[in-house]
Image (cartoon, rainbow, N blue to C red):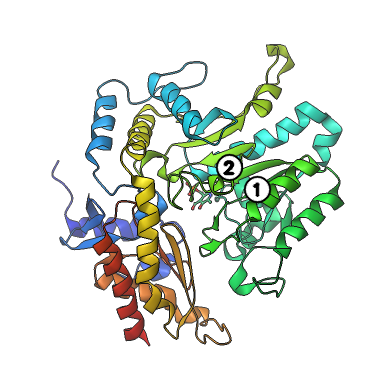
């Protein structure tokens, strides 16, 4: 069978493929971007145009595309075994991955439950936290249990993960079918929901969380937080000390702390995990995206020994964790993950992220001064540039203006691929982007903003 022509691909895409988070009526009117290859930090379309991938393939690619070490690891695994279940059996790449993750994770996390995406890592954590409450405090306490998370949080799109999400645009449609849970105010300092100023606020949003935990008097079985950055809400960077106070409040009130490092994990903020910046070990840690270097869907939920131990017992006590997915711990994905962890260990990747983050921040200074830029937020190589109609009043553009989208298209014309979140231009290049590529990205954004103005 001969390969389909580019025209056939365009037709089939328009006629049959339903794209995620995409208004299909609008998409069907456009000439789609058809990516056929990757080369380091570049994506290549079917017309041979190259785009610097400033989304890191939606925040998961760490070292660029077609990384020789990861390619070789996946190929070698393919010669041995493509898939076998972890239900009641094991295989070498899964066991080794569990071991390696425990070695690099914050101390105290000793057990690894594998799944296949960020949302599934969070679903597992939510269910573990609930069952832990049941196993340690009994049925009555479990029946009253609830979760506490933050406004503007994003933990994925499955029903459990969405229930603890707080991005209005994504989650409110589904609110009637979501498990009720509690919410604390978002640490969105640029538009503080409490109307405070960062210099004098004493991080009052954490006080609100502490008050809720106290009021609920032990009912909250777990608090969920994206440490460092609330990413999908528009790269909202958390104030220093925020995580430490949340962790202390959880301990005081007997709630497990679930940290979602699906976006921040694996060096994005300059440390391997964002929680290490405040030396916090959660009870449960959710990882995905960068875990396989952006190659294959593997996710992990790490647990402390205390949590794990509660699930142990005789078979007929049925204390075990009744949860799993067919492709849990897929061997090809685990091989990609092991190669990725090897690359993170070798060389000075993390130190270089910190240096490059400074360089990017410097390069973005003229962007930050642009009259239609309200805020530039950055943690390591995670960056959000919030566009506003009027800087002095922080007045946003009308949604119908599609400002972020239009800036994204203009960047694409210049050879840079971004996926804005509303009017926040997200820059999340691979960790291995060169100094020159980072400067070019910032310069292209500035040029596009000038054009648009
Ligand atoms: C913090 C966080 N958690 C969970 C998810 C969901 O991950 P996935 O899309 O792999 O389900 C995301 C995705 O962007 C995320 O940023």
Q: Are marks 1 and 2 in contact (CB under 8 Å)?
A: yes
Q: Which residue is mark 1?
A: 224
Q: Is mark 2 within 8 Å of ligand 1?
A: yes
Q: Quadrant of the C terminus?
A: bottom left
Is the N terminus in the top left, top right, bottom left or bottom right quadrant? top left
> Residue 65: horizontal and vertical position, in percent?
26, 48
Mark 1 or mark 2, which has the lower sequence index?
A: 2
User: In front here: 208 or 90?
Assistant: 208
Q: Is residue 305 above or below residue 192?
A: above
Question: Which residue is depicted at the point 46% across and 47% down?
Answer: 271
Q: Callout 2: 10 Å neighbours few (<14), some, many (20+)?
A: many
Residue 432 left/right relative to 421? left
In-image side of 448 versus 426 (left or right) = left
Position above or below: 442 against 179:
below
Give the residue displayed 64% in from the left and 55% down from the top.
Answer: 241
Query: Badge 1: how crowded within 10 Å, few (<14), some, or many (20+)?
Result: many
Report the side of 439 relative to 385 (left or right): left
């Amino acid at each position: 069978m001969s390969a389909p022509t580019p025209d056939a691909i365009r037709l089939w895409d328009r006629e049959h493929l339903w794209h995620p988070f995409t208004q299909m009526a609008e998409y069907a009117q456009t000439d789609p971007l058809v990516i056929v290859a990757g080369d380091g930090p570049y994506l290549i379309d079917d017309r041979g145009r190259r785009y610097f991938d400033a989304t890191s393939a939606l925040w998961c690619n760490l070292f660029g595309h077609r990384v020789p070490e990861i390619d070789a690891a996946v190929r070698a695994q393919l010669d041995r075994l493509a898939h076998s279940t972890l239900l009641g059996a094991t295989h070498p790449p899964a066991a080794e991955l569990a071991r390696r993750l425990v070695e690099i994770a914050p101390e105290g996390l000793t057990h690894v439950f594998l799944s296949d995406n960020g949302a599934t890592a969070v679903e597992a954590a939510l269910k573990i936290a609930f069952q832990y409450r049941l196993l340690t405090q009994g049925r009555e306490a479990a029946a009253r249990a609830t979760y506490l998370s933050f406004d503007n949080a994003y933990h994925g799109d499955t029903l459990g993960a969405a229930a603890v999400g707080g991005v209005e645009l994504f989650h409110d449609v589904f609110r009637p079918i979501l498990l009720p849970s509690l919410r604390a105010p978002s640490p969105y300092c640029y538009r503080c929901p409490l109307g405070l100023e960062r210099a004098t606020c004493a991080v009052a949003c954490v006080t609100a969380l502490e008050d809720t935990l106290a009021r609920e008097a032990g009912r909250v079985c777990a608090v969920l937080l994206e440490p460092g950055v609330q990413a999908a809400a528009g790269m909202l960077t958390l104030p220093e000390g925020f995580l430490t106070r949340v962790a202390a409040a959880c301990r005081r009130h007997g709630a497990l702390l679930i940290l979602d490092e699906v976006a921040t994990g694996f060096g994005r903020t300059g440390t391997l995990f964002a929680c290490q910046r405040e030396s916090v070990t959660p009870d449960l840690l959710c990882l995905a995206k960068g875990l396989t270097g952006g190659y294959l869907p593997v996710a992990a939920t790490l647990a402390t020994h205390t949590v794990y131990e509660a699930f142990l017992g005789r078979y007929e006590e049925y204390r075990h964790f009744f949860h799993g997915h067919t492709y849990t711990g897929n061997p090809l994905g685990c091989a990609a993950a092991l190669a990725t962890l090897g690359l993170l260990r070798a060389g000075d990747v993390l130190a270089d992220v910190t240096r490059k983050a400074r360089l990017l921040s410097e390069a973005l200074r003229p962007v930050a001064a642009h009259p239609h830029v309200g805020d530039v937020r950055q943690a390591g190589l995670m960056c959000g540039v919030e566009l506003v109609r009027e800087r002095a009043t922080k007045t946003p553009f009308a949604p119908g203006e599609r400002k972020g989208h239009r800036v994204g298209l203009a960047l694409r014309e210049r050879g840079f691929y971004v996926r804005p979140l509303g009017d926040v231009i997200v820059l999340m290049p691979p960790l291995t982007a060169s100094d020159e590529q980072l400067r070019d990205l910032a310069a292209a954004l500035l040029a596009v903003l000038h054009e648009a103005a």
